[in-house]
Amino acid sequence: MTMSLGPYASFIVTSYAAAALVVVILIGWIVLDYRSQIQRLRDLDRSGITRRSGRSGSDQR
Amino acid sequence: MTLIDLANPTRFLALTARVLPWLAAATAILLTIGLYQSAYAPDDYQQGATVKIMFIHVPNAWLSMFVWGVMSLASLGTLVWRHPLADVAAKAAAPIGAAFTFLALLTGSLWGRPMWGTYWEWDARLTSVLILFLMYLGLMALWRAVDDPSRAARAAAVLTLVGAINLPIIKFSVDWWNTLHQPASVMRMGGSSLDKSFLIPLLVMAIAFTLLFVTLHLAAMRNEILRRRVRSLQMMQASRVAFSSDVGASKEIGAA
């Protein structure tokens, strides 16, 4: 079973490549954004700034 | 777990942590099956192999409208029910919807050149989808322009609901006006006019892209919740700094 794309192969390949590129960019952006937010939360935690729900009982007194 | 339970962002984060790996795996499997079926689908008797562009163009076109529909529901959640995650959902969906709309326009253009002899035509369908894309960009700009997310949410919700008027215009543009774009061939009265050899790969790709959207949307919502936590903690930090400097200044005045 072989696949022949005919005279308009460049249009077909460009369509699929563009879709793949945009999806990869979307995934990459979301993953990097997640890592960045987690890092910022860790930095704040290290400097003693935590959410009330994240503090221990003695901290909240 | 009910919708009210999910109103708690912490519970929502726990749910996404459990669900996201499964959703990502299901998306990858379905995309692989869909791409394989698309690659080996027969050539169309008129369009030849360019019909393969349909398997990528149509799911993106469907999703461009579906995502705006999701954002419209979320906007109702913001304005009517004041659900805490509604504006998070709306904001997180906008860039993903914009990407799908961009792909629908780009792949449609690449399909149009060999079939219609032109990349672009200012007909009703193409123009209304271009307007949808510009509305996505406008919404994203609005979210970035206003610092306070709760204030931005109300303005964005109103704009989203007004923009929803464009959805039936896009859907029925091919029936209401004489357009270069073909009329509906899948979702139409009397059933699909597509042969099974095209319809099955198309539906698999449509489900795969919908799952991709759900996966990316949940992940983007998780990021947005974390971003808001960072923002509130930074504000807390800033107010502590301001308070301690005020106390220091008043002590100095007292000592003097």
Image (tube, coloured by chain):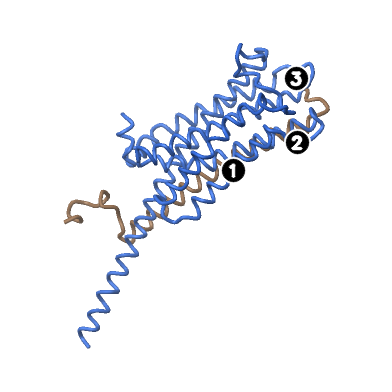
Q: Percent from the top left, x then y, of residue A30?
A: 51, 44
Which residue was labeled with disc 1? A25
Secondary structure at badge 3 equals loop
Q: Kindly check if marks 2 and 3 are in contact, taking CB atoms under 8 A apart as contact.
A: no
Chain containing mark 2: B
Residue type at mark 2 is Glu
Would you say B108 lies left or right of B206 here? Answer: right
Q: Residue B121 carries which label?
A: 2
Q: Which residue is drawn at 32% across and 41% down?
A: B10
Image quadrant holding the C terminus of chain B, namely: bottom left
Is B78 drawn above or below residue B240 in the view shown? above
Q: Percent from the top left, x then y, of residue A43?
A: 38, 58
Secondary structure at badge 2 equals loop
Chain containing mark 3: A
B241 or A59: which is nearer to us? B241
Place residue B237 in its image quadrant. Answer: bottom left
Is B38 drawn above or below residue B126 in the view shown? above
Would you say B128 lies left or right of B22 here? Answer: right
Would you say B248 lies left or right of B50 here? Answer: left
Query: Real-space Cα distance between discs 2 and 3?
Result: 35 Å
- The blue-tinted chain is B
Q: Which residue is drawn at 68% across and 22% down?
A: B183
Which residue was labeled with disc 3? A2
Number of the front mark, 2 or 3: 2
Number of the front mark, 2 or 1: 2
Q: How crowded is mark 2: few (under 14 residues within 10 Å), some or many (20 or more)?
A: some
Q: Residues within 10 Å of mark 3 (few under 14, many from 20)?
A: few
Q: Residues within 10 Å of mark 1 (few under 14, many from 20)?
A: few
Query: Real-space Cα distance between discs 2 and 1?
Result: 28 Å
Q: Which residue is drawn at 48% across and 34% down?
A: B70
